[in-house]
Every structure is written in structure tokens, then in C-alpha cells.
Image (cartoon, rainbow, N blue to C red):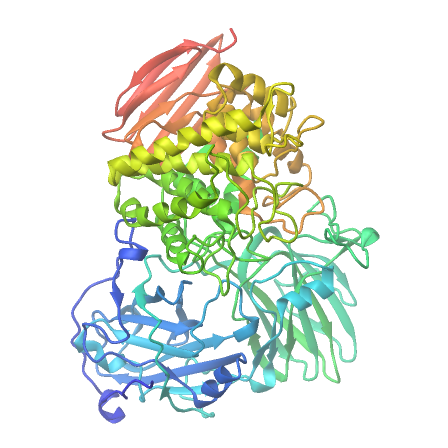
Amino acid sequence: MMRRMLTTLPITALLTVALTVPGGAVEPFQNSGEASATQRTDSSRDAIGAAGAWITHPDAIAADAAKKPIALQFRRVLNLTRAPKSLLVRVSADNRFVLYVNGVRRAAGPARGDMAHWRYEVIDLAPFLKRGTNVITAQVWNDAGNAPAAQITSGHTAFLIQAESAEGRWIDSGQQWEVRVDRSRTVESGMKQLQAAVGPTYYVGGAPEQLTGEHQLANWTTAREAGDWRPAVEAAADEKRVLVADPLPQMRYDAVPSGRVVRAEGVAAAAFPRRALTIPANSKATILIDAGRLLAAYPVLRTMGGAGATVKLTYVESLYDKAKLKKFAPSGQERLFDRSSVEGGVALGLTDTIRPDGRKARFAPYWWRAWRYVQIAVETGEKPLTLDGFDTFETGYPFQQKGHFVSSDQGLDEIFRIGWKTALLDAHETYMDTAYWEQLQYIGDTRIQALISYDVAGDDRLAVQALDAFDGSRVVDGLPQAAWPLNGANSIPPFALLWVGMLHDYWMRSPRQEVIQRNLAGVRAVLDWYAPYVRPDGIVRSTPSWVFVDWKPGLDGGFERKGKGPDSCVVSLIYLGALRQAADLERATGDAARAANDDAAASRVAAGVQANCWDAKRGLYADTPQKLTFSQQTNALAVLYDVAPTAERQAIMSRVMTARGIEPPAGVTGSSYYFSFYLARALDHAGLGAQYPAMIETWRDLLKQNFTTWPETPAPSRSDSHAWSAHPTSGLLTYVAGIQPAAPGFAKVRIAPQLGGLKHLDAAMAHPGGVIRARYKVRGGKLNARLDLPPSVTGSFEYAGKSWPLKPGANVVDAPAAGW
């Protein structure tokens, strides 16, 4: 059903309107109490009156019906007698928009959500407006079947802008806005392109783009230029789309150095991109630029001349080993061991194509890319092509670092730093498993990413977005989807249990209870979903969907992913953990009777695991009641969730671990980089936190490969930028510096360092009330600890078998050094 057309003023009146708009400024949500599920929710026309309509182009209506990609440009030209003091507007689009005011990029969005939580950005346009002529424009696009998997759509490409107050109604989207189809951009399947480049793989990020200079309308963001503009038409309404305010700040768009040329063929390019470079007519040239680190950014190539030329930009995390390329590589092509090396390396990856038409031009893909290396391959026609420059605008969630780890061990410092850089790379409007390949927010990954955000940035807004998004995803099969937002379904029932753990993590770190309260119904739904699959003795039977635990044989759910398999000890333990965590949340903010029921169910599961999964001969818990395989995963969870008796915990951990790294002994399935997060928790719970530095020797080995972010798996790794591998950044603060919450809401702290051979350490963890800082010096057989706590925070310092109380503010403890 079409929504009624706006009743509007004549455009001549709007062009000369004198503005008196109330003052005010946008204040982003700093904390989580009002975020996501409980934030402002508006219908398409809400309490502010006859607000702006969703507008589009007639060609877009046809493209949407055919499910074809399309890009639109919207424009409004105003002649203002004076600039307003404030002009708060709500801006949204389906799928994406970039908003320009007088030629300058001012906002982008909408932040990804789903149909029941379609975001709008709140922006104050007043600082960017001036007396006289103003041009407000928006680039809008919908890539249909080639859109990222995380991009949900109503199927109606459209743009929306609404003033927050009646005095600003003149800005609202309607017939006064002009629109044209941007035919300079087309897209193709990223999955097909990447599979053709590197073999079987999974890619569902931003689509590769083809940008054609011939169809570009130059200066469209700044001038009332002639072109195929026409009045916008109203778009079809979608009753399922519910508008909600975006609780997040705008993503970064920061100019950063593009790097240096490390290889060139067919042209001398050492000075590029600092200086322009000309490629002669009828020639080929290839230029490889190293940004020096893996980043997520918008690339911009500036050109002049070159009619008939073709330029291909290929983005890679690291170069592939030319000597080891295989025609069919089911586990992925191998990369160069040294990620900073280019010798013998091949750039295989996502590729954008640019076709200049001879004019001076600026080519910029609409969606950002992830790369350390970008290869620019040029083939000219009858005219030479000048590359005026290559610009890089880094993007991502604007976290600010508050926590730190600086010690006498540079290797540990580097592990902390790289993990933080990985976390930054994979944090955008949602958390992302990998900025390059999938750009999906998975529960398993996100739980780890959220902890890093709490500990290093002290900013919980992105985490709360994720917690609420997963709760909102239960419309598919009753469970939180493993990845959300998602244009489809991805159910991993064990991940739904980990979502309960993620809520528990938040409860321990935040004094605000609103997030827990509004998600308790989802917690109950997860446990109720599992109940029919639990045997009377507490063991969890095979469930529908993908029963994934870890990327290890027997724990990955199998390739069929149909949920057919044996009853599972390891899933029973994950379920046990969720029951205990849910009981804590119910006692704190929910139903005491439900908490008692969860506790009783947890006791049955624990008894069932002990009776069915313990193998006395091996001294280990088996993965299934058949007791055919044994793993770090199952035994770590048995220790962590107190199934293993206290007296047995350390012996069990010693049987599944070797003296160095996360590699297991023979006959035991080892943890991935991801699941070793739980291995570390089990070590600490067993009283073996002193072994944590030895465990992360695995990451010290990775330093030899010059990673700038952590990879997904050991070689051959699909991804060099996987945030689930970054948990040592949080772990170093938690286990080595020893800073942990000792009460819900981080009301109390327990500081129990495990310094090993460190001579000094300066560490800080972000806290809702500020920062907890711990400075240690070991000298002459004594430890000097200087411990600074935020106001109202108390706790204890535990070291070498002794305990000291801690008060708010500065604390000093002198103790014999451990081992002396």
C-alpha cells in the first residue's frame, strides 16, 4: 500500500525560508540503559507530525521488483536567508546512504539492524549550513542479491530524512527532493569473484564494484548541475519496518597514510602515492602498496586522462605464496609465512574495477574494504593515464583506548597491542568476525570482542547493540541466531547458550540492569528450547541445526550440519554453564523461583556428566558418553563449571595441556585460537593462572610471522583478521595483571597478578567508574604494587598466598616476590 503523498509548500517558498530552529545538539548514548530494544521506536510517521516520506526513483521500483542492484543520488538545493542554530534530522535509507552537505561527507548509515529495528541516524545539520545556497545530497544504494549477508532489506530502495521538530519540516524528504539513477556503479557477486581467485572459500562481505567514469555526474554534491534529475516519488511502505534511533555514534572516517609502494612492474612508481604517476598509452603496469598494517578503510583513486583504460584494485590481507598455489585447495591457498614479505607473493583477493573516461575524476567504492596490501593494475588504451593519488579513509567504531599493558616483556606488550588492533579492525556498526571475509556478528566471536571492549575501551554501547540484536533474532526458530543481522538464517544452538554467558559477562561488568531485564525472556526461551532435548539424567541429546563447538574434528558439527549426532558431553557442559549463569541473572533481576529451577537443572546435568562422561582410566571427561574421544574443550568446561572435583582440576588440566602453548598431548583434541579463551578461564579457575603466560606462547610464535592482526586459524588460514583470536588482550589484563570483577556490576575488584618472570608491569583496565590501574615492580626479592581504584570501588589484592584489602583511590602493597 502506498503511503499518502506529503502536503508540501511550493519549492520557491522553501528556497527562501527564514529559519528559527531551537538550539540543541545530538548526544550519543554513552551507556547502555536506553539502547536498542528500549530505545525510541517510531512508526514511519510518528509523534512529530506529518514527517517526511520515504522517497525513491521510478527506476528503483522496477529494479526492486526484479531484485536487481541500483544506486540513486538525491539532492535538495536551498537558499537560506540565515543559517539555523540547530537542525536535528533523522536520516535513513534502504539499504545504505552517505549524506553530504555542501560537498562534504557528514554522515553514513543506517547502522545495520533488522526489519523490527530499522535504524535512523540523528544528525544536527546546522553546523554545516550557511547563509545563501546550500546543497544537501545523499548517495543511496541497494545491492540486492549481491549485498553483504549482514545487510537485511525491505526490498524497497528508498531514502528518508525527517526534521525532529515541526520548525524544520522544510527539510523533510518529499517531492521537493530531486533524484537520479547513478549508472556509474555496478556490482557483481563477491563470493564468485573470490572463489575464482583463491578457490573454495566463503565470502559474504561488500560486493566488488565497477566504477565507470563515463556515467559519473561530476560535482553532483556541490552544484545544481544539469543532468537527469527528476522529482522524487514516494516509495512503497513496508509495515514490517519499524524505525528506531541508532544508539551508536557515527563510524570513523579518518584520513590516514596510504602506505608505500613495495613493488612495481611496467612503471617506475617509488614516489607514488605521494606524487602523481603517469602510465603511458597502450601499456600495462602493476603497483603494489603496503599500508604497513591491516586496516578497514574507504579507498579513493584520483585519476586524470586515460580514456579507454582499465584499472583494477585488488585488496589482500597478505600475499599468497606463488610457489604453493594449487588449482584446487579445499583448505585454502597458502600465504607467505612472513606477512610483511612481498618476495614471491601474489595478490589474490576482492577486486574493484575502474574505467576512466579522460576527465579528471575521483573513484571511490561505496563500501569500505579491508587490506594491508592493495594492488593497482593498469592497462591503458590510446591515451596515457595519470594516477593523481591514492587516498585512504579509515573506518570503524570510534573506540577510545583507556586500558593498557606495558611490561618488561616486549613480546607480551606486542600481543596486547595486536589484539587491540584486531578488535578495532573488526568493530563497526556491529562486531564482525572478520572485516574482510564475512563482516558478520557471531555470538561466539562477539562474546570475546565485547570483553575486549569493556576492558580496554570501557564503552559498552556496541556490546549492548549485539546483546539486543541476538535477542531480536529469535524470530527465526526461537533461538538467537548464531549471526545477526543476517539476510537469512544461521542457527547454532550452542552459540545461543553462549549468548547467555555473554549477558552474564555484561552483568558482572555493568551496574546497569536494564539490559539484563529486557533480555531475560530470551534467556528463558533458550533454556526452554533445550529442555526437550535433555535426557532424564541431564545429558543433552543431538539437537536440530548446526551443533558447532569448535573448528576441530568431532566438535564442528560435521559438514552436513543437520544436527544428527551422538548425545554430547561437551554440549551438556555448555548447557550447564548457561543454566548457572541464568540462575545468577534471575536472582539479580528476575524470578527467584526460576533461579531455583535453573540451579536444580544444573545439578542434574552436572551429575549426569560425571556419571556418563568421566573416564577413570584416562582421568578425563570424554566428548560423548561412548567415551571414544577426549578434548581440551570438554575438560576445560568440566573444570570451569565445577563438574570436576576441586582436588582433580589441576591434574585434569595437566593431562590436556602441554608445557607450552595451546597444543594438546597425543590422544587429546586441542582448542582453536577461539576456544582457548575458555581454556584460559579453566586454567584460572583451577588455580593455574600462573600457566597463562606459557599458554599464550602460541601467540608469541605468531609474532615471528609479522601479523598486524590475528589470524582465524593456523596456516592455511582464510582470514588474517579474526577477532576471536584476540582474547589475550583481555587475558593479559585479567590473568597476568590479575584484574577481575569480584561482584556484579564491577562493584568490587579482585587483583591477583601472575607476573611470572616480569620485572615490571604497568596495566590498566577500564571500569564503569573510570580505570583500575596496577603498577608492579619486582626488585630485590620484593614486589611493590601501586593499585589505583575508581571512587566507591573496593576489593582485595591477593599475592603469594596472602590478601590485602583495597580501598577507593591509591593503594600501596609491598610483599615478598612469588618464588622467593
Q: Is residue 52 above or below residue 395?
A: below
Q: Nearer the viewer, residue 387 or 716?
A: 716
**Which residue is nearer to you in this view: 391 or 404?**
404
Q: Is residue 574 visible?
A: yes
Location of residue 287 (image quadrant): bottom right
474 with respect to 781 (left or right):
left
Residue 407 visible to an observer of this rendering: no
Q: Is residue 755 above or below residue 474?
A: above
Above or below, comparing residue 390 to residue 155 in the picture = above
Left or right of residue 721: residue 222: left
Residue 592 position, x and y percent, is: 25, 35
Give the percent coordinates (x, y) of residue 128: 31, 71
Residue displayed at 68% across by 36% down = 704
Q: Position of residue 585 (x, y in %)?
A: 31, 38
Q: Residue furthest right?
A: 323
Give the vertical position of 695 relative to 471 (above or below).
above
Residue 222 position, x and y percent, is: 41, 81
Q: Residue at x 16, y 69 (%)?
A: 22
Q: Is residue 147 left or right of residue 601?
A: right
Identify the residue at image location x=56%, y=38%. Answer: 568
Q: Quadrant of residue 211?
A: bottom right
Number of marks in the rendered image: 0
Where is the N terminus found, in terms of image quarters? bottom left
